[in-house]
Image (spheres, rainbow, N blue to C red):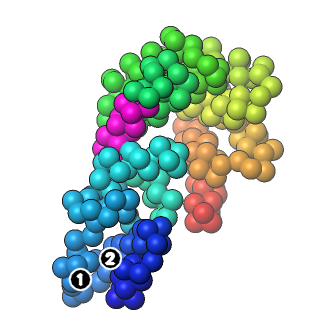
Amino acid sequence: VKEVTRECSSSSLYMRNKCIQHTMLIYVQSCSVPGYRLSSHLAQMSCVTCLEDGAYFACECSRFHVDCLSNFLLRNGNRGECTICYSRFDRSMLADATEIAFTRTRNVFGPTHGTTTVQKLELATALAVAGGAGEAKQLLREIIAAAPEPIWLVSVAKVELARTLRDSGEPVAACRVLEGLVPCLARAAERWAQHEHVEACTLLGACYLDLGHLAMAEKKLFLAMDDHLHNENCSAKKVVTCMRHIANYYEARSEFVLARDTYRVVLNIVEAE
């Protein structure tokens, strides 16, 4: 730790930030060691962006001010996760930072610009995860009603609206959104449409499971899994999500051996990641 802090005093701003980030990793790891006490200097770590005090842990390794986190999201793309430890950002802090980023983008580009709409979509997604489902649904419906350019925004907004509806206990409403969207995505030739089609089929299959429509759930979930298997660049997280729903499908059919084996594959994928 002393070597890291000594390097911070003589390095460029970029290297100072990287050193502080790694120092925070040491800080988090040391908290689990019984009898280990940090010096007051390391116990009062500052924001990894502006280096000022008063920051909060946004993930397992890095502290941010909310304003600085919003700048980080705008600069690096709002992926919702840390680029160092790859853990998800704190939900409430991410929602606040995304709202600031959306306001700044709207002030610069105007309310109808595509960049503003993308930030609005990010805000709705962050609010839905942070417990603001009502506000998230309103924002997503505004995006869909405005039919903005590029056209993929509407499709992504519909998928996120369906996800929010299902998480809010409204699987019937989510099915109505997805049943109209899936055929349109299946006919589109663009790559983004193929990715969204797999996502929509997975979500629609999960909604059918919630409603007890097992035959319809089987069709959509295995269609999504088949697409994953034919895509060498598929997302491991999305594969895991789809396979978890398939395991739930087997449980609903009382095929517990198949459900167990599917869960084992899920665990193997997670451990490999």
Q: Residue at x 63, y 60 (%)?
A: 269
Count of numbered circles on the image: 2
The answer to which of 89 and 103 lies nearer the viewer is 103
Q: Magenta part mainly helix, strand or loop?
A: helix
Residue 90 rendering spot, x and y as whole percentages:
34, 51
Q: Which amino acid does label 1 sit on?
A: Leu
The residue lying at 39 percent from left, 66 percent from top is: 61
Q: In this view, does 4 lie above or below 192?
A: below
> Residue at image x 37%, y 50%?
69
Foreground of the two, 205 or 1: 1
Residue 161: % across, % down? 48, 24
Q: Does the magenta stretch include residue 81?
A: no
Q: Where is residue 81 in the image (x, y as percent from the top left)?
A: 47, 53
The amino acid marked with disc number 2 is: Tyr
Q: Is residue 57 left or right of residue 257?
A: left
Distance in Å between CA atoms under marks 1 and 2: 8 Å
Task: Quarter of the image for the C terminus: give it.
Answer: bottom right
In this orientation, does residue 255 appear? no
Circle 1 is placed at which residue position? 38
Residue 180: percent from the left, percent from the top?
62, 14
The reply, left or right, for residue 158 in relation to residue 96 is right
Q: In the figure, residue 62 lies in which quadrant?
A: bottom left
Q: Give whichever of 63, 28 is nearer the camera.
A: 63
> Which secondary structure lies at badge 2?
helix
- From what the image shows, is residue 234 above or below residue 138? below
Look at the image and say whether residue 101 sits in the magenta stretch: yes
Residue 27 circle label: 2
The residue positioned 32% from the left and 64% from the top of the image is 51
The quarter of the image holding the N terminus is: bottom left
In front here: 35 or 19? 19
Highlighted magenta segment, given as a residue range: 90-105
Residue at the farthest left position: 40
